[in-house]
C-alpha cells in the first residue's frame, strides 16, 4: 500500500456555506420531488472527520424539511478511516471553538445543550447519523444507492491517479442523477467520466450521469 501523507482532520459545521444554501434551496427540494414515491433519501458523508459535516446535513434537513424528516426514511451514513475522529463524532460533544465556527446561533440554541465547557448535540440529530469506519483506498463495503455523497477535502491530499481511482470506484453507489459534492478547492479532472458539473446557488455539484451524457453542465470539468 502507498505511504499516505498525514491527512488533517480539519472540519467545521456548515463548512462552505454556499453548498448548504444550494442544498436547501435547490438540491433537497429536487430530491424531495424525485424520491416522493419511495419516501427515502440516502446520504453519505465520506471522510466525515469529527462529524460536523454529517450533523450539519441532519440539522439542515430537520430545520428546512421537517415533514420529510418525520415521514421519510432518511439514512445519513458518515465514515472516516480514523477511529479517533469517529469516536468523537459518535459522542456528539464539541468545544466552544467548534460551536463558534460557522454554526448559526439559531442552530446552536435549537440542537445543542451545554455540558460543562462543552456542547452536546441533541439525540434527535445524533440518531439521524450512522458512523462507520471505511477506508476509501480499499474496496467499498456494500452500501445503499446514494442520492448525495459528500467527499470534501480529501482528494486534495491524493495524487491525480488515486483521485481518479477513488471517484471511479464510487460511481456504482450513486443513484442516476445523484450528486457528488467536493471541497471548495477541489475539482474533478477530465479523466473522470460520468459526472457533469452544475451550479446551484453559487456552489458546484457534480451530477452523476450514468448514460455517459455528462456534457452540457454549467461549467466544464477542469
Ligand atoms: C480534511 S478532513 C475533511 C473533513 C470533512 N469532509 C470536511 O470537508 O470538512 C479529511 C478526513 O479524511 C480522513 N481520511 C484520510 N484518509 C482517508 C481514507 N483513506 N479513507 C477515509 N477517510 C480518510 C481523515 O481522517 C480526515 O478526517
Image: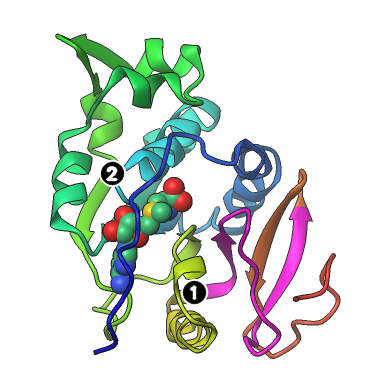
The quarter of the rendered structure image containing the N terminus is: bottom left
| Numbered badge on residue 153 | none
Q: Is residue 77 visible?
A: no
11 on left or right of 86: right
Name the secondary structure under disc 2: loop
Q: Is residue 42 above or below residue 129?
A: below
**Number of on-image labels:** 2
The verdict on residue 38 being magenta is no
Ligand 1 contact, mark 2 (Cβ < 8 Å): yes
The verdict on residue 177 being magenta is yes
Q: Is residue 57 above or below residue 133?
A: above
Residue 202 in percent (x, y) is at 77, 46
Name the residue that disc number 2 marks.
50
Choose the circle earlier in sequence order: 2 or 1.
2
Residue 8 in percent (x, y) is at 35, 54
Which residue is at 61% across, 58% downward? 34
Residue 194 in percent (x, y) is at 64, 84
Q: Residues within 10 Å of mark 2 (few under 14, many from 20)?
A: many
73 on left or right of 25: left
Name the residue that disc number 1 marks.
174
104 on left or right of 188: left
Residue 111 in percent (x, y) is at 34, 19
Quarter of the rendered image showing ligand 1: bottom left
Q: Residues within 10 Å of mark 1 (few under 14, many from 20)?
A: many
The quarter of the rendered structure image containing the C terminus is: bottom right
Q: Residues in magenta?
A: 175-199
Q: Is residue 104 visible?
A: yes
Ligand 1 contact, mark 1 (Cβ < 8 Å): no
Which residue is at 67% across, 40% downward? 18
Q: Nearer the viewer, residue 68 or 155?
A: 155
Amino acid at each position: 500500500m502507498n505511504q499516505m501523507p498525514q491527512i488533517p482532520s480539519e472540519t467545521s459545521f456548515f463548512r462552505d456555506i454556499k453548498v448548504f444554501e444550494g442544498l436547501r434551496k435547490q438540491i433537497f427540494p429536487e430530491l424531495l420531488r424525485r424520491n416522493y414515491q419511495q419516501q427515502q433519501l440516502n446520504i453519505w458523508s465520506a471522510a466525515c472527520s469529527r462529524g460536523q459535516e454529517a450533523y450539519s446535513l441532519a440539522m439542515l434537513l430537520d430545520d428546512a424539511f421537517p415533514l420529510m424528516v418525520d415521514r421519510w426514511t432518511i439514512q445519513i451514513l458518515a465514515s472516516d478511516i480514523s477511529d479517533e475522529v469517529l469516536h468523537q463524532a459518535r459522542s456528539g460533544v464539541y468545544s466552544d471553538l467548534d460551536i463558534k465556527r460557522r454554526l448559526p446561533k439559531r442552530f446552536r440554541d435549537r440542537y445543542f445543550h451545554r455540558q460543562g465547557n462543552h456542547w452536546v448535540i441533541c439525540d434527535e440529530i445524533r440518531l439521524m447519523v450512522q458512523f462507520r469506519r471505511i477506508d476509501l483506498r480499499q474496496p467499498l463495503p456494500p452500501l445503499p444507492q446514494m442520492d448525495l455523497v459528500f467527499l470534501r477535502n480529501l482528494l486534495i491530499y491524493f495524487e491525480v491517479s488515486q483521485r481518479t481511482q477513488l471517484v471511479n470506484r464510487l460511481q456504482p453507489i450513486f443513484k442516476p442523477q445523484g450528486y457528488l459534492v467536493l471541497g471548495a478547492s477541489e475539482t474533478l479532472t477530465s479523466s473522470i467520466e460520468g459526472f457533469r458539473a452544475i451550479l446551484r446557488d453559487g456552489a458546484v455539484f457534480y451530477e452523476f450521469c450514468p448514460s455517459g451524457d455528462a456534457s452540457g453542465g454549467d461549467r466544464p470539468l477542469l
